[in-house]
Amino acid sequence: MIQVYEATDVGLVRPRNEDCAVVFEPSTYVVADGMGGHVAGEVASHLLTDTVRRQLSGVAAIGEEELRQAVLAGNRAILDCEKENPDYKGMGTTATVLHLAGDEAYWAHVGDSRLYLLRGDSLRQVTRDHSYVEDLVVEGTITEAEARVHPKRNYLTRAVGVEADLEVDTGRFSVQQQDILLLATDGLMKAVDDDAIGEILRAGGEDPAAELIQQALAGGGRDNITAIVVVCGP
């Protein structure tokens, strides 16, 4: 038995919400954080989520390759839209997609939205951020704490809808009863650290997604915030 909680908020600073999230059968979850001038970020994130849903809805067997192809289809849709609408030039979006099939989880990812797995007391970041500061952290040039306040912390090295040749990260892992999965845009992680995220998920509140959003707003809400929490039964 799976319980799903979903919440999004424009935050306290941004004029519009450029995040988008969808949950659809079979057991598929998507978050996207759009970027671009005018309303282009909002257009890009919705194009990505709508395309992924169309690609995967009703598909009997979904694995890493199916998720990858769905994100690539979203990439093409955004690039095509940009060609037809010059005002949208430069738009793009992150994409983090999760699909559950029995005791297996499959994911695809581009950008700096994240997929987390909470198992017992341990919270693990499954995806790797495609960002300038993450590369510096991996190199050992800066620490995680320094990355959180780095002036280029919002600079992505990879996004959907920017180039025709897009590399999509994918993976799979086994899920267990009482595992909790979190998909979130970076508006959450900017305001709430991993320890606090883990505490909220472990607490088993009435609506953990809404509680994460409220915590991010209390932390300043400087960006749009989106979270999908998937709790694996019983």
Image (cartoon, grey):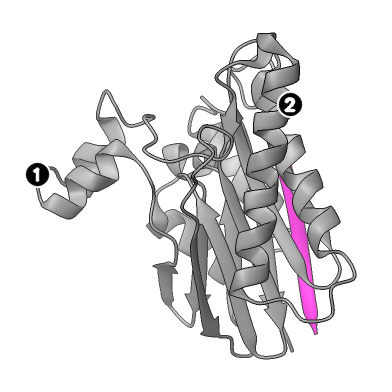
Q: Residue at x 85, y 54 (%)?
A: 54
Seen from this angle, which residue lies furthest right? Answer: 58
Q: Which residue is mark 1?
A: 141
Is residue 182 rendered to the left or right of residue 27?
left
Q: Residue at x 39, y 30 (%)?
A: 154
Magenta-drawn segment: 1-9
Tag 1: residue type? Thr
Is residue 27 rendered to the left or right of residue 176?
right
Q: Residue at x 43, y 78 (%)?
A: 121
Query: Where does the image place residue 113, in percent across and percent down from the top left?
Result: 51, 47
Query: Where does the image place residue 103, in percent across and percent down from the top left?
Result: 65, 90
Look at the image and say whether residue 216 sits in the magenta stretch: no
Q: Which quarter shows the C terminus?
A: bottom right
Q: Quadrant of residue 53?
A: bottom right
Is residue 124 rendered to the left or right of residue 32?
left
Q: Quadrant of residue 44?
A: top right
Q: Residue at x 28, y 46 (%)?
A: 134
Between residue 218 and residue 146, name the one nearer to us.
146
Element under disc 2:
helix
